[in-house]
Image (tube, helix red, strand yellow):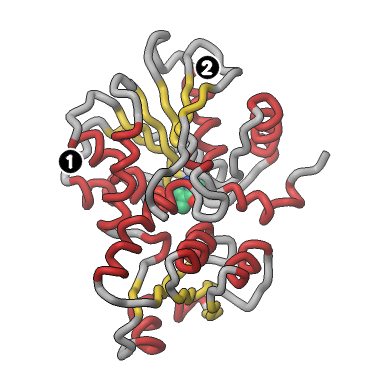
Amino acid sequence: MFTNIYSPIHQLKHTARNQVLVKRDDLIDPYISGNKWRKLKYILKDVQKSNKNHIVTFGGAFSNHLVATAAACARADLKSTAFVRGEVVSNEMLLLCKLFGMNLIFTDRDSYRNKRLLFDSHFGTDPDVYFVDEGGAGTEAVRGCAEVIAELPQEVDHLFCAAGTGTTAAGLLKGIHQRKLKTQLHVVPVLKGGDFIADEIYKHTGNIEQLVMHTDYHFGGYAKTPPALIEYIKNFVADEGMLIDPVYTSKMFFAIDDLISNKYFKKEEKIIAIHTGGLLGIWGMKDKFIY
Ligand SMILES: *Cc1c(COP(=O)(O)O)cnc(C)c1O
């Protein structure tokens, strides 16, 4: 399942001044989408290598990671269980998780904080079970994300990604360093106070040369979608014919547009954005889109 992926590069039609290309990782799979596919690739290989057959992981009730893990496990003939943060709820994302056969354990916010303890108390002695951190974070995830770089044209000046934990960004930067490219990696944290993400990246790469953080495009915080962002999404999708999500990629594309307007880049410089997927996220925000 992790061969022959479809992730073409498309050009945006409506940008001023600079050409912007988009690496369409969102098209890899509707459910194992974007960076979640990249992150799971080597995790699944490691599960198979260690002769386990059951992935246990963690996430919020609207987690792209949970849907991706559920779908990937079903395809790889693995069992999947998720600790879901908060009170018992049902929504479109969790419905998909259940359809893909995932077992959901709703967990109050206090117990959720200590994931190892939670894991051990339910599965501590089970030899078949494999622990995957929230969002799939870890060295396997970094390795998978680094592979994006080999699929890009060599002469990219500026590469953009949205960041929640920074694992994807760490992989991209690692790939840039490994290939000795001159490309700058621009990271747009989607949460407030995103400076810590540079430290997270450093933990994985040991070197943050060529990293540029843009911490002012969070729109109030994680999953916050003020009217200006909703307006931006509506216009972008109608103009480009390319769907973007309200939590991650819309904030990245907004940042790129804003930087272009401020003449941040030289005119001839090449910009590529990674579309990290997450398009199911729109169903958690239906009420925000009033027409
Ligand atoms: C999870 C997710 C991210 C964040 O990835 P990190 O590796 O946690 O920084 C970005 N974009 C989308 C669409 C996601 O689902």
Q: Secondary structure at mark 2?
A: helix
Q: Residue furthest right?
A: 291
Of residues 40 and 94, the one nearer the viewer is: 40
The answer to whether 73 appears left or right of 50 in the picture is right
The residue at the point 52 percent across, 80 percent down is 107
Residue where numbered disc 1 is placed: 207
User: Tag 1's secondary structure?
Assistant: loop
Residue at x-position 31% and y-position 40%: 172
Residue at the image point whose x is 41% and y is 88% from the top: 122
Q: Nearer the viewer, residue 237 or 150?
A: 150
How many C-alpha atoms fall within 10 Å of the one at disc 1: few (<14), some, or many (≥20)? some
User: Which kind of residue does numbered mark 2 sit on?
Assistant: Ser
Say which mark, if any, is on residue 40: none
Q: Is residue 209 left or right of residue 109?
A: left
At 61% from the left and 52% from the top, the residue drawn is 281
Mark nearer the N terminus (2 vs 1): 1
Q: Nearer the viewer, residue 118 or 196?
A: 118
**Can the viewer see residue 225 in this picture?**
yes
In this rendering, the answer to whether 173 lies above or below 108 is above
Tell me which corner region of the image, top left, top right, bottom left or bottom right, holds residue 116. bottom left
Q: Which residue is mark 2?
A: 261
Among the 4 quarters of the image, the one containing residue 124: bottom left
Above or below: residue 165 compared with residue 233 = below
Q: Residues within 10 Å of mark 2 (few under 14, many from 20)?
A: some
In the rendered view, tell whether residue 40 sits above or below residue 240: below
Q: Which quadrant: the N terminus?
A: bottom left
User: Residue 196, how many percent across, how many down?
Assistant: 33, 49
Q: Is the CB atom of the residue marked by disc 2 within 8 angstroms of ligand 1's nearest atom?
A: no
Residue 213 placement (x, y as % from top left): 36, 36
For the C terminus, the image quarter is top right
Quadrant of the image occupied by residue 53? bottom left
Q: Residue type at mark 1: give it.
A: Asn
